[in-house]
């Protein structure tokens, strides 16, 4: 159906793989206004369409690839697209985001989304070109690495492919587009379970703007803002995300030997600075990105994508490795195998600690690196101990023990920040809907340790309110089709010039540390109390307004983010999650990272109740009817009234009316 809003293609493609049936479908403009697009809209579709309790790897699961209105619009950093499904590792909601070339080409083909259901009888390649959709045999592609498979596909098309890890249902298999990854939550295993090896898309459709001149002016100002900003215009282009290694290490937040410590003596050897000096060939970046934070390094005779901070930390300090060249090689290998580097690094480190503690007999040991490449191959093909590692940290701990140091939340392995010296990041990990993700967590580490203005990293006071704000903001940005790195510019450039330990900085920090009582009531301002746009701070809603014709402003934008967050929360609750899942392993809650600092642990019990209250949830983490009504989600919450776990009486008692 045609949309009255520009920027959207106004059509979604749905393929029943079991029956081989292709049809077009769509959502309403009201749903576009409510959820914007991307992960928020996909979560709503998934919630409405699949039955609770299904196996994520069964044909009953859905795999949704969709875009935001800004995807492919020439707005800065707007090549992003989303994948949503049921989470293979957690059993809850899964969302993964990518900057490859598939999303913008899907829109050029005339579609805002591709929805896959059922399971093909044999390996297939789905080809989309304008209105022509073909389901082709892909037997000859099955077994190939992601790079080899992409070489055999149309060079002019946007591509998504899986590698051997996805084919063998490794629970943290990823999907690759070009050199970028839909990395987390096992989305590659879901694609493999459906016997889909590859999807290609291309077309001739153009994205129209509601106000072409206004939109052009908006994105010109936005690009100028990003290029002039110290973070997006200087440090990220210079050192990439690996430029954070030294800062995070000095803050004692760099995971070392399976998060047993937060400091690595050899951090300099694996830092972004060393990467730039000794390995960097050139900078690159996603389509339409002015930041250019991606690294190109040489592995053998090949020039390939360099590792991000997460890969460096989890295959560097977290396994006791100081050889950056090896990390470059393993990063390429995992991309070719189609495997999430974060979960893989967590699984390897956990196996190393199980070995050190005499729980399993293996050759995986901290500081030993000669057998890592073979281990990664074994994981992808589920050989030997690799079969155990392919199940992820949570399931390994259930089989062998070591739950206290099994580093995950809800079943998803934590990213490369030890939260004991950044407790807000710890709260984010615990409450993130998809599990131990640094971005779904709200990335409060930026305000606690790595940004130009830092809050007290051990104080719990204002952290719940800031985590809620960041999580809602990131939801809205992701749903728009824009890279989260654009949010770095929310801190004005002048802040980077303030003396770190000067009077002005101390005053700013004091205000942030004591802002909880004000921030606690942020939701009351939405949307009418923030019916403004601030393009010099957060250009996203202003750009959406000019592109689509929606009456978008900061208040509506953040409310959409809150709505997205809550529909994902409802999905998890329907799958049986409780407040007990908003948790972290004992090591991070009880063991001090710094023996001389009694606050160097995540005091989660002090923050969770305030977090729930700010969100308008009950003491058990259940969204209140009043909040859900404001968000327009009472229909989705109907299951709470009839489920065996939550009777209507208990729900009303917990949540109020």
Image (spheres, rainbow, N blue to C red):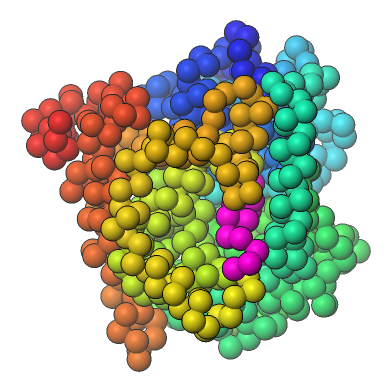
Q: Count every numbered label the image shows and give the total.
A: 0
In the displayed structure, would residue 191 be above or below residue 578? above
Residue at (22% x, 55% y) in the render: 609
Residue at (79% x, 21% y) in the render: 206
Does the magenta stretch mainly form a helix, a strand or a loop?
helix
Classify residue 563 by image quadrant. top left
| Left or right of residue 549, residue 557 in this image | left
In the displayed structure, would residue 519 be above or below residue 193? below
Determine if residue 434 is in view: no
**Is residue 249 found inside the magenta-colored segment of the image?**
no
Q: Position of residue 498 (x, y in %)?
A: 59, 75
Q: Quadrant of the N terminus?
A: top right
Residue at (67% x, 24% y) in the render: 7
In the displayed structure, would residue 187 be above or below residue 499? above
Classify residue 323 by image quadrant. bottom right
**Is residue 486 found inside the magenta-colored segment of the image?**
yes
Residue sitting nearer the eye, 191 or 224: 224
Tell me where the magenta segment starts and ends, as one range: 483-495
| Left or right of residue 640, residue 261 in this image | right
Classify residue 218 by image quadrant. top right
Residue at (70% x, 60% y) in the render: 229
Most distant residue in the right direction: 301
Q: Position of residue 346 (x, y in %)?
A: 51, 64
Q: Position of residue 334 (x, y in %)?
A: 67, 56
Determine if residue 606 is in view: yes
| Left or right of residue 609, residue 25 in this image | right
């Amino acid at each position: 159906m045609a949309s009255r809003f520009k920027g959207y293609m106004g059509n979604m493609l749905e393929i029943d793989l079991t029956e081989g049936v292709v049809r077009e479908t769509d959502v309403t403009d009201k749903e576009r206004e409510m959820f914007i697009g991307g992960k928020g809209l996909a979560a709503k579709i998934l919630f409405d369409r699949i039955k609770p309790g299904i196996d994520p790897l069964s044909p009953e699961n859905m795999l949704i690839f969709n875009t935001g209105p800004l995807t492919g619009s020439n707005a800065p950093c707007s090549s992003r697209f989303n994948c949503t499904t049921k989470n293979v590792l957690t059993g809850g909601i899964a969302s993964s985001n990518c900057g490859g070339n598939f999303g913008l080409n899907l829109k050029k083909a005339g579609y805002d989304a591709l929805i896959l259901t059922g399971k093909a009888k044999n390996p297939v390649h789905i080809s989309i070109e304008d209105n022509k959709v073909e389901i082709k045999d892909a037997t000859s592609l099955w077994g190939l690495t992601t790079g080899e498979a992409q070489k055999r596909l149309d060079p002019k098309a946007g591509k998504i492919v899986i590698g051997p890890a996805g084919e063998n249902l490794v629970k943290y298999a990823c999907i690759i587009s070009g050199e970028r990854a839909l990395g987390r939550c096992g989305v590659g295993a879901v694609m493999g379970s459906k016997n889909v090896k590859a999807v290609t898309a291309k077309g001739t459709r153009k994205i129209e703007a509601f106000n072409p001149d206004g939109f052009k002016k908006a994105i010109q100002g936005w690009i100028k803002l990003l290029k002039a900003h110290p973070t997006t215009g200087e440090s990220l282009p210079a050192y990439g995300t690996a430029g954070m290694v030294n800062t995070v290490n000095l803050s004692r937040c760099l995971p070392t030997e399976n998060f047993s410590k937060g400091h690595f003596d050899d951090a300099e050897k694996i830092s972004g600075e060393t990467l730039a000096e000794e390995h960097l060939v050139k900078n690159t970046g996603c389509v339409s990105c002015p930041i250019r934070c991606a690294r190109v390094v040489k592995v053998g005779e090949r020039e390939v994508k360099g590792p991000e901070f997460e890969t460096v930390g989890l295959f560097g300090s977290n396994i006791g490795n100081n050889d950056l060249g090896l990390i470059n090689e393993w990063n390429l290998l995992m991309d070719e195998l189609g495997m999430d580097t974060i979960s893989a690094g967590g699984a390897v480190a956990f196996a190393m600690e199980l070995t050190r503690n005499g729980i399993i007999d293996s050759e995986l040991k901290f500081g030993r690196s000669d057998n890592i490449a073979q281990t990664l191959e074994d994981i992808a093909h589920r050989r030997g101990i690799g079969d155990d590692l392919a199940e992820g940290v949570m399931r390994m701990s259930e089989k062998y023990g070591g739950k206290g140091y099994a580093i995950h939340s809800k079943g998803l392995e934590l990213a490369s920040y030890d939260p004991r010296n950044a407790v807000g990041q710890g709260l984010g990990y615990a409450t993130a809907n998809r599990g131990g993700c640094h971005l779904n967590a709200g990335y409060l580490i930026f305000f606690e340790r790595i940004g130009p203005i830092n809050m007290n990293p051990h104080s719990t006071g204002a952290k719940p309110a800031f985590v809620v704000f960041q999580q809602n903001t990131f939801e809205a940005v992701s749903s728009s089709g824009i890279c989260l790195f654009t949010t770095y510019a929310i801190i004005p450039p002048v802040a980077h010039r303030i003396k770190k330990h000067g009077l002005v900085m101390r005053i700013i920090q004091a205000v942030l540390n004591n802002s909880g009582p004000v921030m606690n009531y942020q939701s009351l301002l939405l949307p009418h109390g923030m019916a403004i746009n601030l393009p010099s701070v957060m250009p996203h809603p202003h750009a959406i307004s000019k592109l689509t014709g929606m009456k978008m402003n900061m208040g509506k934008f953040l409310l959409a983010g809150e709505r997205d967050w809550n529909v994902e929360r409802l999905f998890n609750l329907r799958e049986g999650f409780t407040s007990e899942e908003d948790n972290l392993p004992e090591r991070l809650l009880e063991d001090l990272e710094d023996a001389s600092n009694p606050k160097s642990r995540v005091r989660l019990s002090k923050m969770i109740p305030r977090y729930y209250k700010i969100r308008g949830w009950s003491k058990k983490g259940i969204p209140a009817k009043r909040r859900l009504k404001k968000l327009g989600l009472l229909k989705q919450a109907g299951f709470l009234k009839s489920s065996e776990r939550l009777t209507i009486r208990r729900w009303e008692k917990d949540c109020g009316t």
